[in-house]
């Protein structure tokens, strides 16, 4: 389990004036969720950027705030970024109830090497890149590993029911849905019809020819 922490300060500045916070190296954020009203806070940009580089949407974060008796347990709900630089400009955190299960989309990470890739004319076809699960906040995984080292033959596949998860996690995705498959690459030959040109009395083979704004949304909360 990753140990992630973040220190925040209550925020008095709201609306369009939050641009002055950003100029001073502070990012406006909101905390909302179980047992509380939405609370505006501000975070040092360096600490926030470091957190976002490590945390995913299912990583539990302890938020420390001056005056609070204990840290708030939150998940990242939404991150708004500058479309030109990629820097965060606003973040929403959701405070969870530790005894209440949550539904979440968890990314899949494929590990190992498939022996089938040594065969000719095969490739790995990915059908799923994440799973829908349900678990208590403390049991939400950062990702779910899928071992592909057992894929040794063409057309062999792994399905959701083949993925091993902990007993504290309930998988909601259809168990019979395919996750990854060793697919054979088949050549497709297209016939090109001959076109008779009456004026010349000759046959010409026809050919098919192929031809080949970022707006920044401001977060003023």
Image (cartoon, helix red, strand yellow):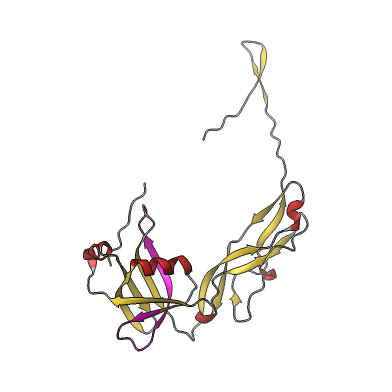
Q: Position of residue 74 (x, y in %)?
A: 42, 77
Write the residue at 56% across / 32% down: 210
Tell me where residue 167 sits by quadrant: bottom right
83 sits to left or right of 120 = left
124 sits to left or right of 93 = right
Q: Is residue 136 visible?
A: no
Q: Nearer the viewer, residue 202 or 177?
A: 177
Q: Which quarter of the image is occupied by the C terminus?
A: bottom left
Q: Nearer the viewer, residue 77 or 201?
A: 77
Q: Which quarter of the image is occupied by the N terminus?
A: bottom right
Write the residue at 36% across / 49% down: 214
Q: Position of residue 45 (x, y in %)?
A: 34, 66
Q: Is residue 186 magenta?
A: no
Instruction: Provide the residue span drawn in magenta.
Output: 63-83
Write the residue at 72% across / 55% down: 182
Tell me where residue 192 sits by quadrant: top right
Q: Nearer the viewer, residue 203 or 85?
A: 85
Q: Position of residue 110 (x, y in %)?
A: 63, 63
Q: Is residue 102 visible?
A: yes
């Amino acid at each position: 389990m990753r140990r992630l922490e973040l220190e925040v300060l209550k925020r008095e500045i709201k609306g369009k004036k939050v641009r002055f916070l950003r100029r001073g190296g502070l990012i406006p954020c909101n905390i909302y969720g179980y047992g509380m009203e939405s609370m505006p806070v501000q975070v040092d940009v360096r600490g926030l950027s470091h957190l976002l580089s490590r945390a995913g949407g299912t990583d539990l974060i302890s938020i420390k705030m001056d005056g609070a008796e204990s840290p708030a347990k939150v998940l990242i709900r939404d991150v708004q970024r500058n479309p030109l630089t990629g820097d965060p400009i606003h973040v929403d955190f959701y405070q969870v109830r530790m005894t209440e299960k949550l539904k979440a989309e968890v990314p899949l990470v494929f590990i190992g090497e498939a022996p089938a890739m040594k065969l000719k004319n095969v490739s790995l076809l990915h059908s799923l890149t994440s799973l829908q699960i349900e678990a208590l906040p403390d049991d939400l995984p950062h990702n779910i590993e899928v071992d592909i080292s057992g894929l040794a033959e063409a057309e062999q596949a792994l399905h959701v029911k083949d993925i091993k998860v902990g007993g504290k996690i309930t998988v909601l995705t259809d168990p019979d849905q395919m996750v990854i498959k060793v697919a054979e690459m088949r050549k497709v030959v297209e016939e090109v019809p001959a076109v008779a040109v009456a004026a010349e009395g000759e046959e010409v083979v026809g050919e098919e020819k192929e031809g080949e704004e970022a707006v920044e949304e401001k977060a003023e909360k």
